[in-house]
Amino acid sequence: MRFSFVVAVAVGGAAGAVARHLLTIAFPDTGPAFPWTTFAINVAGSFVLALLPAVASIRRHPILPPLLGTGLLGGFTTLSTYSEQTRALLASGHATTAGLYVVGTLAACLVAVAAADRLSTATQRREFDAEEGDL
């Protein structure tokens, strides 16, 4: 692994984590309510991550996929907060909200990925497939 890839992932991850943190400060998820901020972060991150392969200029630049995908969007999206919020909802007796959060997030992220895929052209999908999906 080249050092430049490690740096790209680190820089992107730090930027993504800071962006997520700023959003959670601006729009805090509190109490037993549905965690809309984390939900929106994960859905938006899934959508943008699914768009990256459709952009040839990103795919063909060796440093951009690790910077933007693994780094920025990896730092922006959050499985750990998603699981901790689910645990907290369950622990506070809000099983229905926790279940809706788990299933709703998964479903919305899958819809976001499908929507992003529909925005790519058949040519872009063929190019990506020919590259064997290797960003």
Image: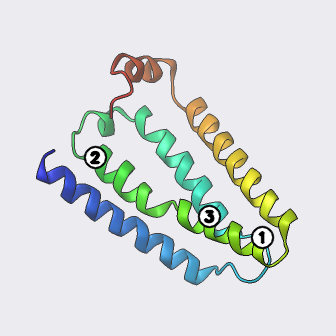
Instruction: Label 2: state its secondary structure.
Output: helix
For badge 1, the amino acid type reads: Leu
* Sequence-earlier tag: 1 or 3: 3
Q: Residue at x 27, y 62 (%)?
A: 10
Residue 23 coordinates in the image, percent (x, y): 55, 75
Task: Give left or right: position of 71 versus 89.
Answer: left
* Sequence-earlier tag: 2 or 3: 2
Q: CA distance from mark 2 to mark 1?
A: 39 Å
Instruction: Label 3: state its secondary structure.
Output: helix
Q: Which residue is mark 1?
A: 90
Residue 101 numbered tag = none
For badge 3, the amino acid type reads: Tyr
Q: Which residue is mark 3?
A: 82
For badge 2, the amino acid type reads: Leu
Q: Nearer the viewer, mark 2 or mark 3?
A: 3
Q: Residue at x 71, y 70 (%)?
A: 35
Q: Which residue is mark 2?
A: 64
